Image: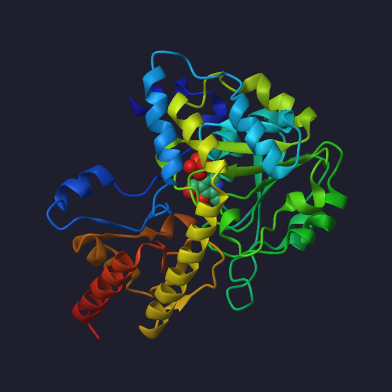
Amino acid sequence: MTDAFENLAAAPLRGLAAYDPGHDLEALRARHAARGLVELGSNENPWGPSPAALAAAREALAGLHRYPDPRGSALRQALAARHRVAADAIVLGNGSHELLMLAAQVFAGPGDEVVVSRYGFAVHALAARAVGARVVTVDALPEQGPAPFGHDLEAMAAALGPRTRMVYVCNPNNPTGTWFPPARLEALLERLPESCVLVVDEAYAEYLDAAASVLDAFAGHPRLVVTRTFSKAYGLAGARVGYAIAHPGLAGLFERLRESFNVSLPALAAATAAVGDPGYVEDVRARNATERAFLAAGLRARGMTVVDSRTNFLLCRLGVHCARIEAGLLERGVVVRPMAGYGLPQHVRISIGRREENAALLDALDRVLESLPC
Ligand SMILES: Cc1ncc(COP(=O)(O)O)c(C=O)c1O
């Protein structure tokens, strides 16, 4: 019977596994309702959105019987001003996940090649496979080096061929937390075939100390797409808003496929207000840096290897007992993200929480480690 359903799927979807969103959080929240669940698995912002964004979302609810602005003009104008590009260089998405999937539909198809990095964000390869493209996975940098598991840009450039239609790069990268100076993309852009587009996923860019985007050096490049999100530093993961910045010619191709009301009314209002409150994001960045240092030091003091991170999460090697430790943490109401699906079975990814959440994680870890056989 399963085969019968499988055969109904379009050819590229056969055998494709759905994106794994991690644990069933609703069930876990119910189970740990008494003491509260410590949620450090999804790289959200534990301090939430700017009060201005929340107020704008609430105000927008009065108009919920109307469709949202299909063009998202106010938000696109605010973003265009912020990034110093034209409004028609901005494409809005129902989260940047949607835009990453759309990018593959726009630029690639059966028989084409899409280059990704091993340990790059899982959605990139999924998006390419879903359109029937062949995924060329380039080995990452070695664990013992300055950017453990990070993108090997030279090897990615060397993997470009006549059939390559897209390259996905994630900077800073999820799940490794590694980052490279965007100017280093110059060589890749120079070697990019005429028929190939570079997609740079900058979901965590707001966490960088100095605003450093590939847009600084290469904005307006005719084959560059940059994706950003309101789900991380802006604290609006539940609103579902992301955007792409691209040459208007490329943005126009996205518009052909974009569902016209893909961003909801409260989400548009919240995101527009959030862009107008840059001080809040700066505050989040500073708090995140303090807590990241606290958590990394706590994990290292317990003998764990932690990859230096430029983001709001840490890739942490728990070792051979990783699965048991992760299960023990969950038992104690602490959620982190297992990394076996990424081919890193001894690692977990831990989002930076508020101080009490980070302390609760370290405390639970101590108790789980005590319970392990020596
Ligand atoms: C690197 C990266 N890109 C994109 C996304 C998608 O985020 P959203 O769809 O919430 O914008 C995520 C979410 O975790 C991510 O880590």
Q: Give the answer, above or below, for where 106 lies relative to 288.
A: above
Quadrant assignment, res 154: bottom right
Residue lying at the far left in this picture: please name it. Answer: 34
State whether residue 286 is above or below residue 74: below
Residue shown at the point (45%, 65%) measured from the top left: 287
Which residue is most to the top?
A: 66
Nearer the observer, 140 or 61: 61
Q: Is residue 374 left or right of residue 109?
A: left
Along the viewing direction, whichever of 195 and 301 lies nearer the viewer = 301
Q: Nearer the viewer, residue 151 or 302?
A: 302
The quadrant in which the N terminus is found is top left
Residue 276, position as x, y percentages in the image: 57, 42
Q: To which quarter of the image does residue 90 belong?
A: top right
Q: Is residue 332 left or right of residue 365?
A: left
Q: Position of residue 221 (x, y in %)?
A: 83, 42
Return the x and y of residue 211 as percentages of the image width and height: 67, 58
Q: Residue at x 50, y 68 (%)?
A: 289
Q: Residue at x 51, y 38 (%)?
A: 273
- Judge whether 281 appears above or below 263 on screen: below
Judge from the rendering whether residue 286 lies leftward or rightward of residue 73; answer left or right.
Answer: left
